[in-house]
Image (spheres, rainbow, N blue to C red):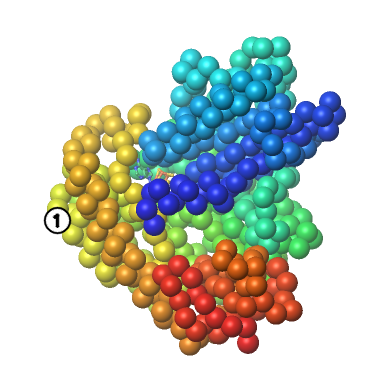
Amino acid sequence: MSQEKYIDEKIQGNALLTIAKQENNKKLYIESYGCQMNVSDSEIVASILSDLGYNTTSHIEEADLVLVNTCSIREKAELTVRKRLEKFNAIKKINPTMKVGVLGCMAERLKTQFLEEEKIVDLVVGPDAYRDLPNLLEEISDGRTAINVLLSKEETYADVAPVRINSNGVSAFVSIMRGCDNMCTFCVVPFTRGRERSRDPQSIIDEIKTLQKNNYKEVTLLGQNVDSYLWYGGGLKKDFEKASTLAQTTALDFAQLLDLVAKEFPEIRLRFSTSNPQDMHLDVIHVMAKHRNICKSIHLPVQSGSTRVLELMNRKHTREEYITLIDNVRSIIPGCSISFDMIAGFCGEEEQDHQDTLSLMEYVKYDFGFMFEYSERPGTPAEKRMKDDVPPAVKKRRLSEIINLHQKHTLYRMQQYIGKTVEVLIEGDSKKSDKQWMGRTSQNSVAVFDKGDEKIGDFVNVLIENCTSATLIGKRI
Ligand code: SAH
Ligand code: F3S
């Protein structure tokens, strides 16, 4: 999938949230850009605001407060938000009392610069400061601007019950950890989301219980680096060594959390995202194999197939170690789908490195993928210490070679399902026809089939008869 498609899909997927304040009839509207974590964070923000009596409306023109939850991962993601702000500017001409707030990674990265550069912005709030929203809203009510971009050592919003936004009523995100300590040299996330900290497992279980009560059937455990999850009573992951012996010996890691949740909710289908290969251990793969309700699908971003480039990226594994991990996944969980993220044209990438990327892809034949041109991000180690020296035309050519090869692999993987029966969780109408259902398999493939007497949220067996590179087509059996 190209970067453009990725962003488009996210925007459509995240769609629009609008909330209207019941008291005083005030209205709020949120858009989310970027990763799944932002979708989840917007649900936390919606919850904090609903406690103040806010409610939804779908008309931005009548909103008193417009919030945009932003992404900084690539320059293009930031430009998309800047363009949206221009649009908001036009709307403000019709609705001059409307307040505009910027949340998320761009807020954290640009801080007060946002207020200086974008005159329309009244409010800037970083990812760890959403609890302060009621105070900040108070501050801007008399025409001042307000900002809180403090990063936290503890904040996991564990006790905030998210208000589900644009939900299909079937699958939901549950955030389990925040921040990232990995410091991949290209990545802005450690700077915008701070250090790793994990959420109390009891609060995770409570949140899933509520989802189950409300008929949800699938949960994706979310974090920037889920395999690094470690609960030892709260606090930063990097302070684990300083914790008491008792806290250390009773700590819960990701494999244990996954096992616990899978056992507690045998009827809920579980997914998780995202894994950094260096932090994914065999015990997680064994837990996946053990539980029927954990989806047989792993997202294992690799970024490059060249050990030399991986080192420049500060990814702490080699090409060979990654291949061993893939081999282990395939032998322990036969039929598991594997997806990836890849960056074309990172600093210092030579033609041979690019060929190594293509040959790694040829080896794995990924089911799904997100592929990007390298985009230099201010403040990252790569921006400070390395040269963005692959010419744009070369980046583009390499990216298109990666995308073309992946297209072949994804079609090949989908074709393997033809003639097989797969279990599909129905999410809603298919995009093309309301006479067909759309759902996902355990491997995360989209499947469509003619409607019968089933309903949204049912698990059904579907015999696959045909496919495209994106969709399995079958009939219910
Ligand atoms: N662990 C995170 C990764 C976040 S970034 C997660 O939860 O998904 C998602 C992907 O964006 C990365 O895997 C990487 O492929 C891509 N990416 C990150 N920084 C980038 C940059 N500077 N240029 C291009 N792509 C980048
Ligand atoms: Fe970014 Fe690497 Fe963490 S890609 S989110 S620094 S694992």
Classify mark 1: helix, strand or loop.
Answer: helix
Instruction: State the residue position of label 1.
Output: 352
Where residue 331 appears, as percent x and y from the top left, is 40, 77
**Label 1 beta carbon within 8 A of ligand 1:** no
Where the N terminus falls, by quadrant? Answer: bottom left
> Farthest front residue?
94
Placement of 132 over or under 431, stated as above or below = above
User: Is residue 457 at least partly visible in the picture?
Assistant: yes
> Tag 1: residue type?
Gln
The image quadrant of residue 44 is top right
> Image height check: is 280 above or below 159?
below
The residue positioned farthest toward the right in the image shown: 23
Please determine whether, in this image, residue 469 is positioned above or below residue 130.
below
Task: Estimate how packed mark 1 is, as few (under 14), some (14 to 19) or many (20 or more) residues with alpha carbons within 10 Å.
Answer: few
Picture quadrant of residue 32 = top right
Near-viewer residue (387 or 28): 28
Frontmost residue, 284 versus 160: 160
